[in-house]
Image (cartoon, rainbow, N blue to C red):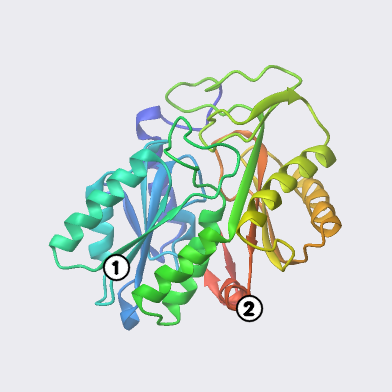
Amino acid sequence: MKMLINTPETVVADALRGMAAAHPELDVDVEARIVVRRDARAGGRVGVVSGGGSGHEPLHAGFVGPGMLSAACPGEVFTSPVPDQMLRAAGAVEAGQGVLFVVKNYTGDVLNFQMAAELAEEDGLRIERVLVDDDVAVTDSLYTAGRRGTGATLFVEKTAGAAAEEGAPLDRVAALARRVVESSRSFGVALGACSTPAKGSPTFDLPDGQLELGVGIHGEPGRERRAMMSSREIAELAVEAVLDDLAQTGPADGPVLVLTNGMGATPLLELYGFHAEVARVLAARGVPVARALVGNYVTSLDMAGCSVTVCRADEELLRLWDAPVRTAALRWGM
């Protein structure tokens, strides 16, 4: 496989050096592997910290900035960051109001963020953790106990970041983040495997003419493999799976946020066509789309495929979604 890298060993450090060069408004510590907004401690706000393995860009470092994350901790490709990174990030953003850790439900992330929280609390910091587990495809997968954390992470980070920017206290920021998790469901589909820099070849075998339904963002197996389907058919299956699961916690016919997300190698031409089908299925189910976001936001290196995330949204969540944000990958209202 051809890749635009120097060596597999330096790919994350090289990317961080590039981020530092492109975004001087961020404090990028290549050695410590943390990305912090320069004004993180200004205004006495709650700090919002997230992180995970690299390879899912722009998640998480691309969402550091006003109105979203205070800091992010990138691990090696598809590998959790270590507790020292999270502890350093918490210390860099703590402004007397506490810190919220946003954690995707993958075993390494859960364990390391838990350890970091314990160490931070020993240092006198107040820490809250929110676990994102929105994927409806499978339970107890290769990387998780319970459901995987995927596209809803973006909704959680945006909502929590907006609430912190407004000056909400830590318990309120955490409660809003948990409400987003409870209101969100996702489903992913792979049309082709991703290739990690270290391996240099596809991480799993997906024969020509087949797709993987319910794939994870590391290429973990989903519900089943089928012969290739049309965009219309994939949208119907994915949206029905999401809405049916969401309906178990309450009515699924109110206004929603929708993320039509590319896995890294899916062009916008295809994603917008797919979103048209997603919108069609939601309309047929009587679900009004209040806001939509289309693009490659929660990726899996160069995987071809897509995911759909739906979040039941009340007026408060919509207000926080619409609040100004200025990050490398998401910006409006500023």
| Residue 120 pos. (x, y %) | 19, 60
Residue 204 lies left or right of residue 288; in this view the side is: left
Residue 209 occupies quadrant? top right
Res. 234 in view: yes
- Return the x and y of residue 32 as percentages of the image width and height: 25, 49
Query: As displayed, is residue 153 above or below residue 203?
Result: below
Which residue is painted at 82% across and 62% down in the image? 286
Residue with the mark numbered 1 = 93
Marks 2/1 in contact by CB < 8 Å: the verdict is no
The amino acid pointed to by label 1 is Val
Residue 169 disc label: none
At horizontal 69% and vertical 39% (from top left) the residue drawn is 266
Could one spot residue 327 in this view of the protein?
A: no
Residue 279 image offset from top left, x and y in percent: 80, 56
Mark 1 nearby-residue class (10 Å; few <14, some 14–19, many ≥20): many
Q: Report the front residue among 285 and 297.
A: 285
Secondary structure at badge 2 equals helix
Quarter of the image with the N terminus is: top right
Q: Is mark 1 on a helix, strand or loop?
A: helix
- Give whichever of 277, 174 is nearer the camera: 174
236 on left or right of 55: right
Of 293 and 125, nearer the camera is: 125
User: Residue flagged by tag 2: what amino acid is it?
Assistant: Glu
- Relative to 282, is 256 above or below? below
Judge the density around disc 2: few (<14), some (14-19), many (≥20) Cα neighbours within 10 Å. few
Give the residue pinned by disc 2.
315
